[in-house]
Image (cartoon, rainbow, N blue to C red):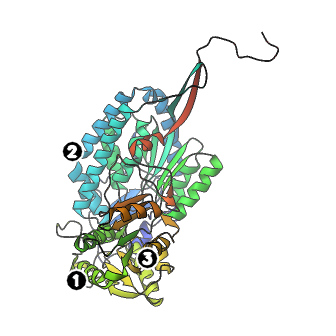
Amino acid sequence: MSTDSLTENPSRSAREETRAPGAAGLRNGPDTRDEIFVSGVWTRGSGALIESVNPATAEVFATLHAATAADVDAAVAAGLEAVKASGWARRLPHERAAVLHRISSAIEANADRIAELQTLDTGKTLVETKALAMSAAATFRFTAAALETMEDVLTPPRGNYLSMSTYEPIGVVGAITPWNSPIASDAQKVAPALAAGNAVVVKPPVWAPWVSLLLARLCEQAGLPAGLLSVLPGPGRVVGDAIAKHPGVGKISFTGGTSTGRQLAHIAAEKIMPITLELGGKSPTVIFADADVDQAVAGVLYGIFSSSGQSCIAGSRVFIQRAVYDDVVERLVKGAKALRIGPGTDPATQVGPLVAFAHRDTVAGMVEAAKSAGAQVLCGGAVPTESRLQGGAFYEPTILAGVSNSDAICQEEIFGPVAVILPFDDEADLIAQANDSVFGLACGIWTADYRRAWRLARAIAAGTVWINTYKQFSISTPFSGLKESGLGTEKGRDGIRSYMRQKSIYMDLSGAPIPWAGLK
């Protein structure tokens, strides 16, 4: 999954280079005030200017001054103090859960407002951004319920004593979130971190900061004690780096690109602090000859082209059993060509613009490189020529064939609406190709044979496997990646525990002194 890294700032110049002539647009409105949220206080940042551009129109709709390293210092200090002064960590679980429930209700009540702002900022369809808002509400609601029912563990004693495994908050945690699923990714980090009794410093992406700031306002209105949450937009090389390296930050949770995740892992190793990484993917989607072809084709198209392919779990490598290869490919191409490209505000749109022109150009460059290496373009592979799409960062749904699994286009994450098609002969051939990747995030299997589906689900290296479906999620089910796709777990009860320290407690029940040689 891509995001701004610790070494780049893709905000202003990258967007200005391809802005439509004369684009002006709206300057800050009620939900886009030039303020960041530091230690429970709304204030204007003193960092670089961030210009937010609607990727469907190239219009600047808001500006924001970024946070600085000094803001990180203030947020961490206030977070440590707030955990103590507010008694947040000492509150009973149901008392913390009550605040999370109120945040959930606030998100749900403002779902349309959140969706509209997110569509403006990222270009995603309103259908998707509304779903992401409702997902965030569900995350806070589930986390509140799980918190109320979590138990410490009374472990089996090996002597005349009582032994217990209990959990305590870390203190201040840093959450670095991606631009491709704002609000939902924020919730998956902020909710369990708060539930565990911590303060949270969030660094949202410079490409999509506004929904994270709106979430801060809703948390504030829901009665979250001041100082427990800070939201500091800014470039990764400034704000993200300062959060990760700060001695007062006891854990980092990051969703984004693998290269940035590797940098953060090095910082965590130096500090000997826990880290959760949800990184990139090059997920295989598999269609067997016995699959329901209509169901499989629809699922594969959704798996790669929804979100305009800007998803870490996108099913970007499509493996088709050779016996049905030609028929399935024909259907996939026909389906991809029929997808409607347009702005996210149009209810008919299925494929919106990419988040920024610079990112669109990166995707296009990867496709051009694949073509030069011999890939065959079955559909797409270009910027749309329709006049109604000329002002935006659009790219056609693209299907490539004539490639080998070892080719760069099959090994590198594209993070755009681009699928590669690969034939396979049997299970052994499939497993070898599917696992020939540095990533291991997700996998989709389409077959009528449940025994085969089970064998493959266990044999393919992926943190999540879908059988005859794709992109099906539940906040109650843990999510993780293998290999270079990540480290640690999000979601589920384990997601709360990941923001806590485990402690073992022993209590003697015998009343007798510890036996020691020569002592009576």
Q: If you read the primary sequence from the N terminus, does the residue marked by circle 1 or circle 3 appear first?
A: 3
Mark 1 closeness class: few <14, some 14–19, many ≥20 residues within 10 Å: few
> Which residue is drawn at the image coordinates 40% and 37% (left, top)?
195
Q: Are marks 1 and 3 in contact (CB under 8 Å)?
A: no
Relative to 323, residue 96 above or below: above
**Residue 39 location, quadrant:** top left
**Residue 379 location, quadrant:** bottom left
SS at mark 2 in the image: helix
Q: Report, in whole angstroms, how far the alpha carbon at label 1 lies from the one at label 3.
A: 22 Å
- Disc nearest the viewer among 1 and 3: 3
State the image coordinates of residue 508 (x, y, percent, origin top left): 60, 17
Left or right side of 347 for 93 = right
Q: Is any atom of residue 27 visible in this view? A: no
Q: Label 2 belongs to which residue?
A: 109
> Which residue is drawn at the image coordinates 27% and 62% (left, top)?
120
State the image coordinates of residue 33 (x, y, percent, origin top left): 32, 52
- Disc nearest the viewer among 2 and 1: 2
Q: Hey, what amino acid is under mark 2? A: Ala
State the image coordinates of residue 70 (x, y, percent, origin top left): 53, 47
Q: Are marks 2 and 1 in contact (CB under 8 Å)?
A: no
> Which residue is drawn at the image coordinates 50% and 62% (left, top)?
5
Q: Nearer the viewer, residue 416 or 232?
A: 416
Q: If you read the primary sequence from the N terminus, does the residue marked by circle 3 or circle 2 appear first?
A: 2
Left or right side of 273 for 27 = left
Q: Label 3 belongs to which residue?
A: 362
Q: Hey, what amino acid is under mark 3? A: Thr
Q: Label 1 belongs to which residue?
A: 387
Left or right side of 209 for 276 = right
Q: Nearer the viewer, residue 231 or 109?
A: 109
